[in-house]
Each structure stands twice: as structure tokens, then as C-alpha cells.
Amino acid sequence: MASTLVDARDRLSAPARLPSFRLLWLGQSLSLLGDGFSYIAFSWITLGLTQSTLALGYVLAFQAVPRALLTLVGGSLSDKWSSRTLMKLSSWARAALMAGVGLAGLAGSLTLWMLCCAAAAFGAVDAFFQPARASILPSVVDEEQLAPANALLGVAAKVSAVLGPAVGGMVVAFSNAPIAFLVDGVCFALCGVCVAGIRPLPRPAAEEETAEEGAAGSAVPPRAEVSLGARIRAGLRYAFEDPRIRTILAVDAAVTFCQAGPFTVGFATLAKVELHGGSATLGLLNGALAGGAMLGTLVGGAVSSRPRIGLLIAALAGWLAIGTGLLGLVGNTAGALATVVAMGFGMGFQGVFGLSWIQRTIDGSVLSRVISVDMVIGYAVAPLSLIVCGALAQSGTAPMFAVSAAVLAVTAIGILSSRTVREMR
């Protein structure tokens, strides 16, 4: 038993012994910390300037729309220029932008439209960072270390997602919003420095010769000889022609639909109406989900075997279907928390292997484009989930959770019905 635990610990910590991975880990953490800072800073300074929640909605929409529209472009350019280059340039651009907004705020010259333009620029630049962040790992660690490396990055991402808004709120509370923008700029600048120090692994000659062929055998147009639009279309065609990748995209869409609404509208309604709690209960539900996900991520990274990914994602869909269905029936806080922890664990565990499969299987010349397709689908599905769940929750949480459980159950059955998908490794 002790030997097994030592082996698991050594496997999980192996990527951290690589200098380039440590720089990537720190750079990603700083970037996500900066994202949390920017959300708080934009929100607080907009409300302070306008006293209008409608104005805040405009600012946040100006940030979200360019990010969604340009993610495919970011994925295409990341494949063409290299993920490292795009992450570095995006980080420094966001640093300059946040510093400019902070200085304008300190000078008292900010207006609502300036904030809207800054938010739009931030969202646009961030769209080039996100696909690159998800696709750079295969150039930093070898194939056998992808799972533990993804686990370490995943845990850091979850911690940063919690700390960013919390620390940003403290900075605003003890100083003011413009100072938070300046601190945010420092986070992004340091992220750029970390990424600039990454030294990619040498690429095998055989991989160079086959870099333009897809995992499913479909040809990808040569990098330097096609237009941006053609590259985007090639990425879409590559993603949707391979049944295995289509399955990953479909499962991610189903999980996003059954997560975005149920874990926001659903948790809030469950805490207030069904469990007769308050904001503390809502915080416990979100904390249980995050804690379960982090534990599942660490366990997934420590596992030495490579599970059959097709069966694993089917199991995740079924696991979440059971958990979501139980949330509609549970009548006490302890039961709800236990269910949410178990759901988070499954999401974290499968997430390590799902992302590692994508990074290991999809050719590097098209990897960022496929990841950007997945991101755009998520951007489209999440608002739909919020609207649908908001309407269903008017009748209580049971109908909303029942619909989500049904979607996940159908997803699991669909996965198991395909032999090609079942045999994915």
C-alpha cells in the first residue's frame, strides 16, 4: 500500500521536475488569477461609475462576445505560429490594456464607453490565449506525462479561479478598482515572462514529416499556403469528420448544458427553496463541487494505467445523470453536498484523461483549432442552458434536474452504442 502511494506521488510530481512545465504552471496560474481580478475590477468600477446593473451587463457582454467570436481565429493562429508565441503576445497585450485602464481610472478620466471598449479588447485578446493554453502541453512534456501534467494544471486552474475573484475583491475593498486593474496588469505581464521562458521539447523528424496529416487520416492544408478562413474550415472539417472527436465534442456540449444552468440557477434555487438555506448553503454547494473536482483531478493524475477513454466518458455521463437526478430528490443539505462532491470527483477524474487523449491523439498542426471548436460550442451552449434551466426552475428544482439527468443518460447510451467510440483509448 505504501509503495503504491509513493508511486502515485512520484507519478503526479514528475512533470513538476521539468523547468518548462513549472513555468507553464506558474504562467497559467497567473493568467487565471488575472482573469478573476479583471472580472471583479470591471464589475466594481462599472457599478461605481454608473450605479447601473444594466451598464454592467453591457460591459460584461462586450467582453464575452468578442471572446466567443474570435476563439476559432485564435485556435487557427495558434496552430500556425505556435501556442507559446500566441500566449506570450496575448499576455503582454492584456497587461498593457489593464495597466492603461488602471491609469485612466486613477486619473478620473474613465467613461462607460471606454470601459466597454477595454472590455471588448480584453475579450478579443483573451480569445487568442485560451486555445493556445490548452494545446501547448504536448510540446512541454512527453506523452506519458500528459495525464499528471494536466492534473497539476487543472488543480492550479481551480485554485486560481477561486483566489482570483477573492483577492481581487480584497484589493478593491482596501484600495479601489483602478489599483486592481494595475495588479491585474502585473499578473498578465509576469505570465508573459513565464511563457517566454518555456523551451519546447525537440520535435521528432518523423513527426515533422507527418505534421500535416490528421489522426483520422484526413489531410490538413499546409500551414503557410492557405488563408485564415481556409484554416478554420479545415479545423472544423477535421473535428467533425472523426467520430471519436465528434463524440468528445458532443459529450462536452451535453456536460456544459447540464452544468452551466444546473450548477448556477439550480444550485441557487436548491439552496434557497429546497434546502431552506441562504448564501452560506450556496457557497457550500459550490465549494463541494470544486473540492470534489480537485480531488478527482489529483487521483486521475496519479493513476498509472491508461483507461479506455470511450468507456470512461460514457461512465462520466451516466455518473452525472445519477447525481443530477438525486439532486432533484434529496431533501437535506448533507445529502446534497455528498452528491455534489461525487459529481465533482467524476468530472475531475475524467477531465484529466479526456484532455490528455485529445492532446495525445490529435495532430499538433490542428490541435488548437479542434480545441477552439470545443470552446466555441461551450460558449454557445452555456447561455442556452441558463435560459432553459431558469424557465424550468420556476416550477422547482426537480423538473430542471430531471431534464439534465435525461440529457446525460441519453448521451451515455449514445456513446455505448458506437463500437468505434467504446474502443477509444
Image (tube, grey):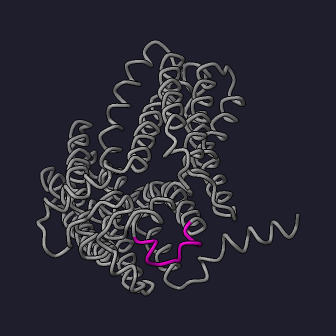
Judge whether residue 143 is colored magenta.
yes
Q: Residue at x 41, y 34 (%)?
A: 257
Residue 223 placement (x, y as % from top left): 20, 73
Above/below status of 204 relative to 262: below
Say which quadrant the C terminus sits in.
Answer: bottom right
Residue 393 placement (x, y as % from top left): 45, 19
Residue 130 appears in which quarter of the rendering?
Answer: bottom left
Q: Residue at x 63, y 24 (%)?
A: 326
Residue that lies at the very extreme toward the right in this rendered image:
1
Residue 161 placement (x, y as % from top left): 48, 56
Stretch of the chain drawn in magenta: 136-146
Residue 360 placement (x, y as % from top left): 48, 66
Q: Nearer the viewer, residue 43 or 189?
A: 189
Q: Determine whether, in the image, residue 110 is placed left or right of residue 202.
A: left
Q: Determine whether, in the image, residue 114 is placed left or right of residue 247.
A: left
Above/below status of 126 relative to 254: below
Q: Determine whether, in the image, residue 338 is placed left or right of residue 264.
A: right
